[in-house]
Amino acid sequence: MQRAMMDGISDLPISVQFDFATGIFSPYADISERRMSDLKEMFYDQSVVAAAMALDNPIIYEIRYHPFLTSVSDMGLGVTRIFPGKVGDEYHMTKGHFHEQPNQPEIYFCVRGEGYLLLETRVGEFEAVRWLPGTITHIPPQWAHRVVNTGADILVFVASYHLAAGHDYAPILAHGFAQIVVEQDGAPALIPNPRRI
Ligand code: S6P
Ligand code: ZN
């Protein structure tokens, strides 16, 4: 079958509508929830993780996706809502990943909330970008990316990427990022990742 005749493929412009009040756009094709159990290796205080999983296994964040497929391209839109909160003193965050394909970047646009975007290369270069509503970051290929919500409000960001990029979670699962974001004296602080010390 020709690609242009497959389901969901259109070579015409398509728009979806984003609601700034809720951080939800529609229509969307799919939604994923990430609960404590999905991130259990990511947080450093494993006793708090185990207790939260046993209690109610809370949702840490959710992502709504929409693929924009044409006969020659595969742009993906993802809007992530990270709920406020901490695991012990470590703020809620996304799992974080590299893109599998070595030439695939991404655009992240913070539309609500506050926090940090953590970025790290496979050879250990590390950056933490302070994020506020309106911050737009270009994530170059082969920089792993994780968003941390340090505020009392939900953090919402828009992601735009090619679906062919793929996701590689394994290195983050194995050793996390160089730094973690925790509350110290009532404020967010970046500290070395205890799993790497
Ligand atoms: C995809 C893009 C986002 C994330 C989403 C959840 O390349 O970066 O849509 O998938 O923010 O993060 P994670 O690390 O759980 O995939
Ligand atoms: Zn990505």
Image (tube, helix red, strand yellow):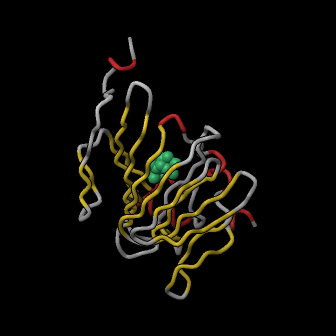
Query: Residue 184 sits in which quadrant?
Result: bottom right
- Quarter in which the C terminus is drawn: bottom right
Report the side of 172 relative to 137 (left or right): right
Q: Position of residue 119 (x, y in %)?
A: 61, 60
Is residue 38 something one can see in this rendering?
Answer: no
Residue 57: quarter of image: bottom left
For image coordinates 47% across by 65% down, the residue present is 92
Rendered-image quadrant of the N terminus: top left
Q: Residue at x 48, y 53 (%)?
A: 107
* x then y, percent, for residue 91: 49, 70
Expressed as whole percent of the image width and height from the top left, the position of residue 179 reads: 65, 68
Q: Is residue 167 above or below residue 51?
A: above
Residue at the image position 29 percent from the left and 37 percent from the top:
13
Q: Position of residue 56 (x, y in %)?
A: 37, 59
Out of 97 and 196, give the one closest to the viewer.
Answer: 97
Q: Does any portion of residue 52 appear in the rendered image?
A: yes
Residue 2 to residue 8: above or below = above
